[in-house]
Image (tube, rainbow, N blue to C red):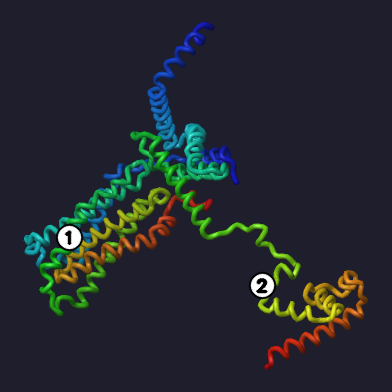
């Protein structure tokens, strides 16, 4: 067991200059820029869904998509705020209104158009391509978020992972509805809720372990 | 010059009594600004400032930790935990914001983590007490052997010499020499008695189990 004065001496000897983190909103903007780049690349590669312009004129679709995008933006900001020790934990409530709007809109569409789905409403090939979009969007964004949030590991790992994965999930859901014809109700439900549940669940399972992996080294040496 | 401190001392104390809250607040605000400046310089790599900062926050952290932990060892461990955490995430401090809330938030996380870890350990682990020790005396361990009670009953039916021989040599697992010294019987008679005892025990146990 090292004595506290010795510990202080060794820490002071290791005090290399560090770069201060930029303000949380700015860091969220950087991450969102990355998200925009990923979405643009996917759009160039896969092409936007053919009926996007018509669909955007339908209020239900437009509201649902805007709400998903807004959830992503707000959750990203909340994640970076919550990851700092001296900001209130209540920032985690920031994306809640947008999230409610998004989920209730998806639920409403399901209720009103339940009959509209036929057996031809979904095809396996489309589902596989959807999955590819999901991985291509979700993976880089999750990794970037994880690395950017690594300083939250010793503080509020759960809240930060939750917000981060919500942001990734919302952006991914937006990407899915941009690129794929998934308006059959069950598909909407599956992809929107499924994506959100998938990312939040994965974060819950592996978040802490992944955080340990990228966390600043001195922290877990003594555990 | 000699007068000045004497005359100012009491008046200061009087003022201090009346407005201790206000004085405390200005003192802690000044301390906070000091710490902010020290931390800002530490972030730029000033080791002396960093060392002074860590030395100054240690007693403060100790008093915070003492509210959460009872064991002095725990208090010191959590203070060191907090110092290590502060070191590893010193990038996250923004010098335009007050220092104390930043520090207290980190400290509380560490204290609560330690309390939780202790709670988990307490639920899973039981400290060994004197009762958990084992004894070589067979009477202390008889319960652990499935047929111990039955065997003991059978042994007590034997003649006294055979009983003694089988108890010493087989149940306590002493050597012939030790058993001879302890019982006062000769080695030969011990051997003979053990042989007879085992023979009759075998017979008794087989009889009982066959029908």
Determine if marks 2 and 1 fall on one subunit. Answer: no
Name the spot of residue A100 as percent of width and height, x first.
20, 56
> Where residue A19 is drawn, which disc sits there?
none
State the residue position of label 1: A104
Question: In the picture, which quadrant includes the C terminus of chain B?
Answer: bottom right
- Spot occupied by residue A146 in the image (x, y as percentages of width and height): 35, 55
Which of the 4 image quarters holds residue B36?
A: top left
| Pick the front one: A159 or A143 | A159
Chain of the residue that carries numbered disc 2 in the rendered image: B
Identified at 84% across, 84% down, the residue is B195
> Callout 2 environment at 10 Å: few (<14), some (14 to 19), or many (20+)?
few
x then y, percent, for residue A63: 12, 57
Identity of the residue drawn at 81% across and 87% down: B199
Residue positioned 49% across, 40% down in the render: B65
Residue B178 is situated, as x and y percent measured from the top left of the image, at: 87, 70
Kindly identify the residue that appears in the image at 42 percent across and 41 percent down: B90
Q: Could you say which quadrant of the image residue A38 lies in?
A: bottom left
- Chain letter for the residue marked with disc 1 in the picture: A
Give the side of residue B171 with respect to residue A172, left or right. right
Mark 2–mark 1 CB contact (< 8 Å): no
What residue sits right under mark 2 in the picture?
A: B144
Find numbered disc 1 in the image and state the secondary structure of the residue it sits on.
helix
In the rendered view, tell whether residue A223 sits above or below residue A54.
above
Please state the total of marks drawn on the protein image. 2
Mark 2 lies on a secondary structure that is helix
- From this viewpoint, is residue A181 visible? no
């Amino acid at each position: 067991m090292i004595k506290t004065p010795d510990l202080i001496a060794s820490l002071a000897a290791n005090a290399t200059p560090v770069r201060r983190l930029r303000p949380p909103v700015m860091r969220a903007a950087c991450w969102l820029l990355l998200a925009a780049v990923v979405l643009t690349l996917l759009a160039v590669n896969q092409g936007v869904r053919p009926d996007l312009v018509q669909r955007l004129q339908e209020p239900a679709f437009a509201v649902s998509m805007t709400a998903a995008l807004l959830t992503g933006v707000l959750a990203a900001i909340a994640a970076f705020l919550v990851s700092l020790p001296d900001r209130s934990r209540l920032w985690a409530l920031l994306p809640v209104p947008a999230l409610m709007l998004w989920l209730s809109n998806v639920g409403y569409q399901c209720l009103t158009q339940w009959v509209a789905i036929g057996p031809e409403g979904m095809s396996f090939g489309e589902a596989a391509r959807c999955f590819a979009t999901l991985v291509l969007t979700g993976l880089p964004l999750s990794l970037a978020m994880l690395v950017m949030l690594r300083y939250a590991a010793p503080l509020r790992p759960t809240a930060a992972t939750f917000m981060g994965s919500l942001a990734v999930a919302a952006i991914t859901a937006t990407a899915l509805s941009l690129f794929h014809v998934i308006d059959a109700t069950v598909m909407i439900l599956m992809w929107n809720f499924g994506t959100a549940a998938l990312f939040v669940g994965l974060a819950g399972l592996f978040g802490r372990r992944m955080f340990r992996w990228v966390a600043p080294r001195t922290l877990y040496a003594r555990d | 010059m000699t007068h000045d401190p004497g005359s100012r001392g009491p008046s200061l104390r009087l003022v201090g009594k009346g407005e201790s809250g206000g004085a405390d607040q200005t003192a802690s605000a000044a301390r906070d600004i000091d710490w902010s400046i020290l931390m800002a310089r530490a972030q730029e790599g000033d080791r002396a400032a960093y060392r002074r900062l860590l030395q100054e926050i240690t007693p403060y952290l100790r008093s915070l930790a003492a509210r959460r932990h009872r064991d002095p060892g725990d208090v010191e461990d959590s203070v060191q935990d907090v110092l290590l955490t502060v070191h590893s995430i010193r990038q996250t401090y923004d010098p335009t914001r007050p220092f104390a809330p930043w520090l207290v938030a980190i400290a509380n996380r560490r204290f609560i983590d330690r309390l939780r870890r202790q709670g988990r350990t307490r639920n899973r682990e039981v400290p060994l007490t004197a009762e958990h020790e084992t004894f070589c005396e067979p009477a202390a361990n008889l319960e652990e052997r499935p047929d111990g009670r039955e065997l003991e009953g059978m042994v007590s039916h034997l003649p006294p010499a055979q009983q003694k021989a089988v108890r010493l040599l087989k149940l306590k697992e002493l050597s012939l020499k030790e058993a001879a010294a302890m019982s006062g019987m000769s080695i030969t008679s011990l051997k003979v008695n053990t042989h007879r005892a085992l023979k009759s025990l075998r017979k008794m146990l087989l009889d009982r189990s066959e029908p």
